[in-house]
Amino acid sequence: MADLIPNVGSGTLLERVLLADDRAIRIGAIHQLDYDRAVVITHDRWKSEVGGIPQYAFLLATAREVGNGGGDDDEVLLLRVEGTAPLALERDQLAVREEALREALSKKHDPSPSAILDVDLDPFTKNRVSFTGLDCRIIGTFYEDVRDGRQVLDFGHDVDNFYATATYRVFKPVGDGLSALVSFIKPTEDPVQMVRIGAVRFSSTRRRTILARQADVPVRVNIQDFIGTKTGMFGMTRMGKSNTMKTIAARVFAVSEQRRSEGSSPIGQLIFDPQGEYANPNTQDGTELAAIGVGHVVIYKFGAAAGQDNVRPLGFNFFDPEQIEPTKSLISSVLADATADYVKGFVQADFAGAPMTGESDGDAAQRRARAERGRLLLYGALAKADFALPTQQADASGRQRAWRAMVTMRGALASEIERALGPGHIRQFPGGRAVGVERNSLTTVIDWIIARDEAKDLTGEALRGLQSFVSGDAWRSALPIYTQVSQNRQVSGYAKLKPLKHYHSPSVQADYRRDVYGELLNGRIVIVDLHLGPDDAIKRLSERLAEYLMDRQTKAFTSGSEPPDIQIAIEEAHNLFSTDKYRDDLDVWVRLAKQASKLNIGMLYATQEVTGVDHQVLANTKNWVVAHLNNAKEVGELGRYYDFRAFGDAIISHEDRGYVRLKTMSSPFIVPVQIDRYGRDLVNEARLAAGLLALSPVQG
C-alpha cells in the first residue's frame, strides 16, 4: 500500500535523540491542530503510566513512522501543555455521567453523596469518559539539517506544514530524551561548552515525578552564553538568585582555567556583595566561593587586616603619594557642595606632580616639589580630621620603612626647623633636598612653617627657602582646609573630611582599584564585601571601582586591542538601572549597561523589580533567570519579553526556592528548571579545573 504521506519517515538523528523507545513514551494523538496551538487527546491510564502530565510539560508530536525508512520531510513538533481543552464528545460523556448520577439518586435508599457519587460506571462508559484534552502551544519544530557536511538537529520557531490530525502521534519525552530536549541549543559556530545548571521541574508538586524517577533529569546550558553578555536574575529575596550567581561564577571559573591551560587569557570575575553572602560561608550552601582556593578568590572588605591570605583591605591609603589622585577626587566630592573659592582652587590644584609631555627637567622637578608640599599640608589636614597615619610605607625598591611625609626643601630652611623645634621632627637625607617629616611631628612642622610665613621673621637662605616652599598652587589651595580660614573668614576646612575616614586604610600599599583590576586580569574571582561599610562609602567605592574598570577597558578598546573578558555581578539592579537614572549618560552604571558588551564585560544583575529596570536594559538582556515574583505588575512587565507571559500565574503562585524559568541566548525556548544548589561538588569541580585537590569531607 502506498504511503498516504510521502517523504515522512524515520530520520535517524531525530529518532536517536528524541523519539527512541527509552526517550519518549506515547501518550496520545492530535485532536485539533493549527499553526499556533494543538489539542492533544490522551487517556487517564496513559497519563498515569508516564508519571503524569503537569502543566508546562513538553510533548512531542510527529507524523513520522518511527523506525520505518527515511525521508526528507522528517520533523517533530514541540508542544508545551498550558491547560485543558474540551473534546468533541465530552459534552455527551458528561451527559451520560449526569444521567447515571440522577438515576442512582432516584433508586438509592441512601441519598448521601458517597452513596450516589461513588456509583461505578460500566467499564465501557468509564473508559470513554477517561479521555481528556490538553491545550498545548506549539513552540516550534525540530528537524534535521546538514551543516558543513555533518547532520545536525535544528529548531525552527514555527510550523512550516501540517497534516491531518489523525496522522500525528504524541509522545512525552523522558530521561535522556527530555534532557536532550531541554538542553538543546541551536547549531552555532560560536564556542559551546555545555554544563549542568539544574534539573527539569514542571510543577511545584513533584510526587508523581519522583515516583516515576524523573525528578533529576539534567538541564545543561552553554556556559559561553554568560560570558560577555547581560544576564538578568529576577525574583523575590531568598528565592535562589545568589545561589544561581555562585553556580555561574564557578562554571565560568572552570572555563577560565581551561583557557589559561591552553595559553589564552583567563576571565576575571568581579562580584559586588552588599550582604556578604558571596564572601562568607552560609548554612544554605554549606560552603562559599572562596572555597575554590585562596589563590583564585580574593575578598576586599572594610576593616580587613593586612597579612590575610586572600583578604584585602577595601579603601585608599590617603597618605600614600601613589594614591593621591583617588584621594583628591574623594575629597573634592565632599567639598563639591561648597562654593567658596578655596574649594575651586583645591579642585584645580596638582597634588600628583606627574611630569608633562615636553616639559623640561627643571620644570618637572619644580612641579613635583610643589605637589609634595601641597600633599604635606593635605596630610596635616587629614591628621587634624583624626585620620590614622600609617606606620610604614614601601620605598622605591619595595622595602618597608618608617612612614614620613617626604618633601623637597632647601637645606637652610630644614636646618632652621631643626634649630627651632629641636631634633627628631624631620630627617634630612644626603645627596639632595629630600626631607622626611616624621609622622608624630606632622602638624608641629606645618604649624611652624605657617607661623613663620605669617610672621615674616626669617632671613637669608632660610627666608628664600620658605618663600619657595609656600608659593605653589598646591600649598595655597590646601592651606584653607588645614587652617579653616579663607580670606579672613572661618570655613569648614578639614572638618568636612571626617566622613571620608571610612575610605581610609592606612595599611593599603596601592590604589585598591588598580589591585582589583590586576586580580581580574589574572582570572581571579574578586568579591567586594560591602556589608560592613556605611552606605555612602559603599556607594562611592562601588562607583569608583566601576569607573576605573570602564576606563581601563575603554583604553584597551580604543587602542585597537581586544579588551580582556571580565564578568561583573551586581545586586539590587533596580536602584542602578531605573528609567530615571538611565537618562543620565554620565552615570557609571548607565554607561556600564550601555557599553559593557563592546568592552567584553559580562554583566549579571539581580533584582526583585522587573519594572525598576529600564526597558533598554531588559531588551538587551541575553539570559533570563526568573524565580518567584509576588505581584501581577512585575509579572506583566516580564510578559513583554519572550513568552514569559504564559508562565505568569505559576511565577506568582510557585514559591519554591531555586525553581526558575530559564531562557539563555543559545536556547530557543524557555525551560522550567530547579537550579542545583551551590555546594561542595561544584566547588570541587572548580578546584579540579584549577589543578587543586578536592575538599575533604571535613573541610568547609
Image: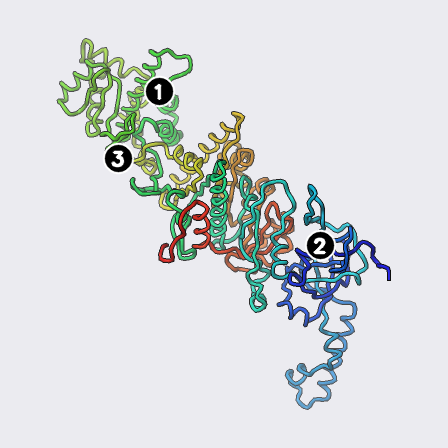
Indicate which disc, 1 or 3, sits on the residue closer to the N terminus.
1
| Residues packed near mark 2 inside 10 Å, few (<14), some (14 to 19) or many (20 plus) | some
Which residue is labeled 1 in the image? Answer: 353
| Pointer 2 or 1: first along the chain | 2
The quadrant holding residue 61 is: bottom right
Q: Quadrant of the C terminus?
A: bottom left
Query: Percent x, y for residue 19?
Result: 69, 59
Horizontal relation, residue 320 to residue 695: left or right: left
* Element on which disc 2 rests: helix
Q: Residue furthest bottom?
A: 109
Task: Looking at the image, tell me whether mark 3 or mark 2 is earlier in sequence order.
Answer: 2
Is 60 in front, or is 230? 60
Identify which residue is drawn at 56% across, 57% down. 218
* SS at circle 3: loop
Q: Residue furthest right?
A: 1
Establish if 662 lies above or below 167: above
Task: Identify the amino acid type marked 2.
Answer: Thr
**Tag 3: Cα neighbours inside 10 Å, few (<14), some, or many (≥20)?**
some
Which quadrant of the structure image shows residue 598? top right
Residue 388's disc number: 3
Residue at image mark 2: 12
User: Is residue 173 positioned above or below 497 on the image?
Assistant: below
Residue 620, given in percent of the width and then of the height, sits at 59, 40
> Which of 573 and 199 lies nearest the eye of the viewer?
199
> Residue at coordinates 42% horizontally, 12% vertically from top-left?
358
Q: For residue 597, which quarter of the picture?
A: top right
